[in-house]
Image (spheres, rainbow, N blue to C red):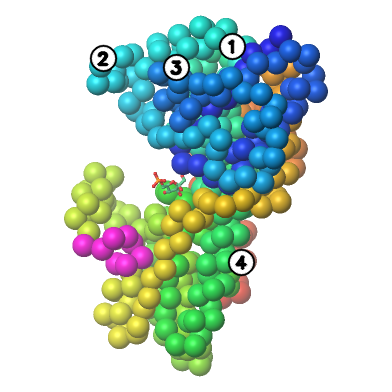
Amino acid sequence: MKRIGLLTSGGDCQALNAAMRGVVKGLSENVDELEVYGFHNGYKGLIYGDYRLLTSRDFSGILTKGGTILGSSRQPFKLMRVPDENGLDKVEAMKQTYHKLNLNCLVILGGNGTQKTANLLREEGLNIIHLPKTIDNDIYGTDVTFGFQSAINIATDAIDCIHTTAASHNRVFIVEVMGHKVGWLTLYAGIAGGADIILLPEIPYDIKKVVEAIEKRSKAGKGFTILAVAEGAISKEDAKLSKKEYKNKVAERKFPSVSYEIADQIQKAGGTEVRVTVPGHTQRGGSPCPYDRVLCTRLGAAAAKAIMDEDYGCMIAMVNGETKRVPLKDVAGKLKMVEPDCQMIKEAKRIGISFGD
Ligand code: F6P
């Protein structure tokens, strides 16, 4: 008999269900008796004992289904040690739920913050397996996270659609891409969508260089310019500020996001008409792309194998095309960022893409 718990935490993404399906199918092949408990709405379900017993039927027909059948929520890691409004010790409560159900292990699907809490639970003695989920692709220790590829497709579609209208009106267009503090999604979607300028958090921009790049295209007879701007893009000037100073500046910003600020600056500098498009949460929505379905099926099956081997305390990563068990203690709290002088950036620059630096 194996008793496992499943939970999905943090922002959702397209292939969470596919990953859980992989885990459960992988285990069903190996154990006669299996009990799977699904915790509702991420760590909240584990803290407050909100769960349901799942059957194989719950995992049937969900390979292509976006979102998560368990629901998700954000439970910041920094508040995990802070008692809730009723004085409840969240970490103790999670441990109690785990022990009450007599779980062999807990499979946790989530991004960076989720991973930190997963590691905390490991330190507290629970058997944990983490699966790397996020459209941001910023989890250290894995080449790729699930959701990333599906989100690239959506962000690229958005840029593709902008292309025809930008060309018709001879305008400058900004497409703002998600990614939190990293630029992976913007970099891939920007290149795939043929963006002329790509602005990433890892390469602070100089607005003068951005305007120069637009003018250069205009002089070359190109009537329009498309910018792919990461939601976390930052100017050279702002990059010099302390974390606190920058946070205060953003709080006082009169624009809804960095893209609108950049649009305003470009308009003021050149009198060019600029339009901003924000695909926002559409990037996390819909059905997982085939790549993510395969990735999650493999990660899920590899997690099942780790459970059979009773090898816990790890993230199931994808490294050089192979699934790999990476110790959580080695990766929790680390961020995988775009290297400003990596080959991909150099190649993008070689074909004339400006990074505003
Ligand atoms: O981490 C995934 C992500 O979609 C980020 O790209 C984005 O910054 C954030 O979540 C948005 O969070 P929320 O769904 O809480 O608005």
Q: Position of residue 25 (x, y in %)?
A: 74, 28
Going 70% across and 35% down the picture, which residue do you hit?
60
Q: CA distance from mark 3 to mark 4?
A: 44 Å
Q: Which numbered disc flags the more N-terminal residue, 4 or 1?
A: 1
Q: CA distance from mark 2 to mark 1?
A: 26 Å
Q: Which numbered disc flags the more N-terminal residue, 1 or 3?
A: 3
Of the 4 image quadrants, the one containing the N terminus is top right
Does residue 260 show up magenta in the picture? Answer: yes
Residue at image mark 1: 103
Please say if the residues under marks 4 and 2 sit with CB atoms less than 8 Å apart: no
Residue at image mark 3: 49
- Asked whether, in this view, residue 224 is left or right of residue 319, the answer is left
Q: Which numbered disc flags the more N-terminal residue, 3 or 2?
A: 3
* Start-end of magenta stretch: 254-261
Q: Is residue 333 visible?
A: no
Going 25% across and 16% down the picture, which residue do you hit?
86
Residue nearer the viewer, 249 or 216: 249
Does residue 117 show up magenta in the picture? Answer: no
Q: Nearer the viewer, mark 4 or mark 2?
A: 2
Residue nearer the viewer, 207 or 16: 16
Identify which amino acid the numbered label 3 is placed on: Gly
Q: Is residue 80 visible?
A: yes
Q: Secondary structure at mark 4?
A: helix
Q: Position of residue 17 (x, y in %)?
A: 62, 38
Name the disc covering residue 192, or none. Answer: 4
Residue nearer the viewer, 217 or 149: 149
Q: Which numbered disc flags the more N-terminal residue, 2 or 1?
A: 2
Name the disc covering residue 87, or none. Answer: 2
Q: Position of residue 326 (x, y in %)?
A: 63, 28
Q: Which numbered disc flags the more N-terminal residue, 3 or 4?
A: 3
Is label 3's Cβ within 8 Å of ligand 1? no
